[in-house]
Image: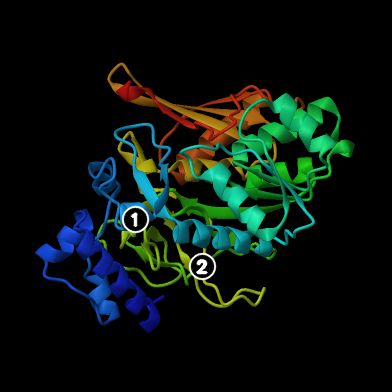
């Protein structure tokens, strides 16, 4: 999807602000003698921005607006290295709220809904992002934040909340706890707005069936406002993203050249109207594709496919490169397996070994037979033989945030 004339104009306004602020990207542009662009080709020649650039700017080196106009900061949830600090002006906060309100509307949420928010508040963008959009919509917010599952379930019943906002991991944990306690009839949830981590079709079906709700994928990242820059609609054919606020291109992560619509690659995002910390051609390392054509819902907003993983998720074992999502796709082929799995890679006696733990969907499954079938499928489809261990449903750890599915012990 080529950049439009109006978007080029908006990028030029961002370039002016960045050059004036003399931040890392402004200096990059100045060194290249770039003061503006006039075509799609010019845009594709602009330099990328990377997470490292943002970390190097710690603490407030990304600030592009005057400090008197900055009303808030947020920070990425990364656990390694310096955090990324993103400053927001009031307009940025309002724009983000408008995008999030649009997300709720696409999910069919109205001001008559009661929205139960479980993601974290504070420096993380999730909780406050979900809340800001819900308040703009005029819906009642129950701002729970993470943890204390007992209290979550009590409030869900007492407040008769109708919309659950959560990571997929926590939504699954809540679904399992509701089932265990036999309180499903007391739960009034109708919809789930789920974000923050990649999740497979099998997990989606489990959450949807166990809670009896419609699910909507929401997309976003702290560096680009936060969650709320895109969401799936009721037809569930990809996530509509708001191209009046962000321009998205998909690049080949090796050649760094844009790929045609429909082709898989890395998502690169440019903010079009951001004031506090605009970003141009920011490499997200998320893998997806732009879905060509119109959506059945009739919206003119373009669509991204579900996130397939990250370029930095790639694992190598016995000379074979693969992504965890490939393992997930294989597990999804077996109804006897549940959605939950864990990959453990270790280096023993001079060679790499992968152990794959998978929960059975019920106690009636033949564990040994299922392990054998999955082992053979991984060998034929990916090219190496893992050690597969089938375990009882509920045995693998559950998380209130994001599930850690890959443990690589070779580097510990």
Q: Residues within 10 Å of mark 1 (few under 14, many from 20)?
A: many
Quadrant of the rendering where the N terminus is positioned: bottom left
Say which residue appears at 66% left-offset and 46% top-offset: 204
> In the figure, is residue 299 to the left or right of 32?
right
Q: Quadrant of residue 99?
A: bottom right
Q: Position of residue 208 (x, y in %)?
A: 73, 46
Q: Earlier in the sequence, mark 1 or mark 2?
A: 2
Q: Which mark is residue 76?
A: none
Q: How many marks?
A: 2
Q: Nearer the viewer, residue 200 or 366?
A: 200
Q: Position of residue 343 (x, y in %)?
A: 48, 30
Q: Nearest to the eye among marks 1 and 2: give it.
A: 1
Q: Is residue 183 visible?
A: yes
Nearer to us in this view, 267 or 384: 267
Q: In front: 4, or 85?
A: 85
Q: Is residue 163 left or right of residue 279?
A: right
Foreground: 338 or 221?
A: 221
Mark 2 — residue?
A: 242
For residue 277, which numbered disc appears in the image?
1
The residue drawn where x is 73% and y is 35% is: 175
Judge from the rendering whether residue 246 lies leftward or rightward of residue 281; answer left or right. Answer: right
Can residue 361 be seen at all in this image of the molecule?
no
The picture places residue 273, in percent across and down from the top left corner, at: 40, 67
Secondary structure at numbered mark 2: loop
Query: Would you place residue 262 above or below residue 330 in this image?
Result: below
Q: Crowding at label 2, few (<14), some or many (≥20) Cα neighbours within 10 Å?
A: many
């Amino acid at each position: 999807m080529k950049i439009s004339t109006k978007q080029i104009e908006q990028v030029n306004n961002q370039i002016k602000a960045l050059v004036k602020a003399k931040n890392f990207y402004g200096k990059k542009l100045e060194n290249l003698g770039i003061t503006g662009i006039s075509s799609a080709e010019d845009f594709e020649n602009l330099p990328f921005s990377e997470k490292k650039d943002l970390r190097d700017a710690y603490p407030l080196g990304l600030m592009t607006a005057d400090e008197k106009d900055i009303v808030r900061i947020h920070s990425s949830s990364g656990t390694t290295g310096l955090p990324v600090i993103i400053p927001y002006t009031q307009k940025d906060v309002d724009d983000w709220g408008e995008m999030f309100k649009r997300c709720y509307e696409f999910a069919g949420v109205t001001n008559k809904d009661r929205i139960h928010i479980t993601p974290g508040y504070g420096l993380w963008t999730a909780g406050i992002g979900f809340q800001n959009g819900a308040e703009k919509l005029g819906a009642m917010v129950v701002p729970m934040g993470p943890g204390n599952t007992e209290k979550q379930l009590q409030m869900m019943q007492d407040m008769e909340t109708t919309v659950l906002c959560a990571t997929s991991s926590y939504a699954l944990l809540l679904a399992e706890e509701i089932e265990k306690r036999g309180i499903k009839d007391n739960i009034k949830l109708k919809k789930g707005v789920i974000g923050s981590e990649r999740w497979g079709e099998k997990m989606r079906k489990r959450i949807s069936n166990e809670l009896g709700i419609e699910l909507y994928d929401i997309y976003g990242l702290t560096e680009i406002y936060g969650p709320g820059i895109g969401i799936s609609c009721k037809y569930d054919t990809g996530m509509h993203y708001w191209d009046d606020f962000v321009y998205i291109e998909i690049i080949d992560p090796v050649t760094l050249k844009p790929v045609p619509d429909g082709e898989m690659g890395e998502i690169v995002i440019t903010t079009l109207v951001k004031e506090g910390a605009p970003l141009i051609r920011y490499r997200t390392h998320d893998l997806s594709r732009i879905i060509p054509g119109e959506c059945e819902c009739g919206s003119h907003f373009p669509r991204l496919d579900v996130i397939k993983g990250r370029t930095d998720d790639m694992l190598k074992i016995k000379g074979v490169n693969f992504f965890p999502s490939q393992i997930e796709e294989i597990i999804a082929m077996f109804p006897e397996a549940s959605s939950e799995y864990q990959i453990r890679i270790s280096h023993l006696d001079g060679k790499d070994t992968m152990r794959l733990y998978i929960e059975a969907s019920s106690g009636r499954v033949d564990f040994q037979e299922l392990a054998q079938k999955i082992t053979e499928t991984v060998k034929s489809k990916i090219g190496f033989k893992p050690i597969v261990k089938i375990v009882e449903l509920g045995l693998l750890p559950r998380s209130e945030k994001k599930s850690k599915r890959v443990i690589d012990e070779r580097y510990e």
